[in-house]
Image (spheres, rainbow, N blue to C red):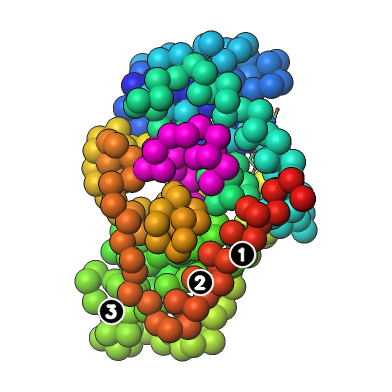
Amino acid sequence: MKIAIIGVGTVGSAVATAVKNTGFVHEIVLFDRDGIRARAAAEDLGHAASFGFDVKISAVSNYRGIRGSDIVIISAGANQKPGETRTDLLNKNVAVIEDIVPRVMANVDAKKVKIIVVTNPLDVLVMLTQKISKLPAARVIGTGTMLDSARLRTILSRHLSVSTQSICAQVFGEHGDSSVVAWSGVTVGGFSLDEFCKQLKVSLPATTRNTISHRVHNAAYEIIQGRGATWDGIGASVSDLLRCIINDERRILTVSCVSGVQNAVAMSLPRVIGATGVIATLNPKLSSDESAALRKSAKIIKKNYDNIGK
Ligand code: NAD
């Protein structure tokens, strides 16, 4: 399995680290328009790899070097500075996608390649990548709200004193400020959240739930404020998604993809992921407030997409 990572800044490097540690990938090639940075990353990661799985890591100086890649990860482009929203990155990163995707497509096998989009604003760029690449929508996947869902599970786990592994809690919609925390579908060890709280005498009133939703929405801003950027969470999200694809695991992940649901907007919904990419999309059962918030989120993504170039 050969993986190409385009854009080897903070996020691309974290993705490479997490991917090499899966043990499922035999070759990782790194491309960045800053060739010195890509070569330095390949050196450092290569040294790290010598302690673990046997994986060949190299920097390539042009797109011909990505030939033979099964999966291409796009993590290039401007990141958020403190106070900036993901949408603020739109015009800069549209240009990045317009630069990268045609070059990628000229050097991969369009019949089988999958593209994973990480660059923000994520959902809009998934739509743009799918349009430019002309790949089937099922093979252009954005990490979407995988990370937001992980944040929700982590915060809930601390409140409930139970492992994140026992919590099924999902965030849908935009990977951005309008994402929707689907409280109505949260289960813990197969129990509804209310039933779990009742039996274990845990108090989780509406005010606490609102605070948790707020923390999920603001997690990236807080991390950027304290650390300058976010990288570990997204690195782990990408490697989990990759593992699911490579092993045809058919787990349900909240990834972004253009689908007929919500008028062909790319947004995160529960999707079955396997070797061919997105195998199926589920329509979650939501409360009326959550459904309205999801429709609003879809409209925001569509509006941002329509604003490209304006
Ligand atoms: P960074 O500035 O550290 O790195 C970006 C890299 O992209 C740089 O090395 C730059 O040289 C390269 N680059 C820019 N334009 C390029 C082009 N046209 N071709 C090739 N390389 C190019 O930024 P970062 O912190 O790594 O963030 C990268 C992106 O990931 C940002 O858009 C950020 O918002 C996004 N991100 C997404 C998530 C998510 O959950 N989806 C999480 C964190 C960050």
Classed neighbour count for the residue bearing mark 2: other residues with Cα under 10 Å, few (<14), some (14–19), many (≥20)? few
Q: Report how far apart the C-alphas of labels 3 and 1 lie in the structure.
A: 31 Å
The kind of residue on which mark 3 rests is: Ser
In the rendered image, which residue does mark 2 sit on?
295
Q: What residue is shown at x 55% (from left), y 51% (from top)? A: 123
Mark identifier at residue 153: none
Q: Is mark 3 on a helix, strand or loop?
A: strand
The kind of residue on which mark 2 rests is: Arg
Callout in the foreground (3, 1): 1
Q: Is mark 2 on a helix, strand or loop?
A: helix
Q: Toward which corner of the image does residue 166 lie, by quadrant?
A: bottom left
Q: What residue is shown at x 24% (from left), y 46% (from top)? A: 250
Residue 127 in the image: state x and y as whole percent.
53, 46
Q: Report how far apart the C-alphas of labels 2 and 3 lie in the structure.
A: 25 Å
Q: What residue is shown at x 32% (from left), y 56% (from top)? A: 281
Residue 86 in the image: state x and y as whole percent.
67, 53
Q: Main secondary structure of the magenta part?
A: helix
* 45 up-or-down from 125: above or below: above
* 266 up-or-down from 4: above or below: below
Q: What residue is shown at x 71% (from left), y 36% (from top)? A: 95
Callout in the foreground (2, 3): 2
Q: Is residue 131 magenta?
A: yes
The segment highlighted magenta reads 127-151
* 123 up-or-down from 6: above or below: below
In the rendered image, which residue does mark 3 sit on?
192
The answer to whether residue 53 shows anywhere in this view is no
Quarter in which the N terminus is drawn:
top left
Label located before the other in sequence (2 or 1): 2
In the image, 172 versus 152, the foreground residue is 172
- Ligand 1 has an atom within 8 Å of the beta carbon of the residue at disc 3: no
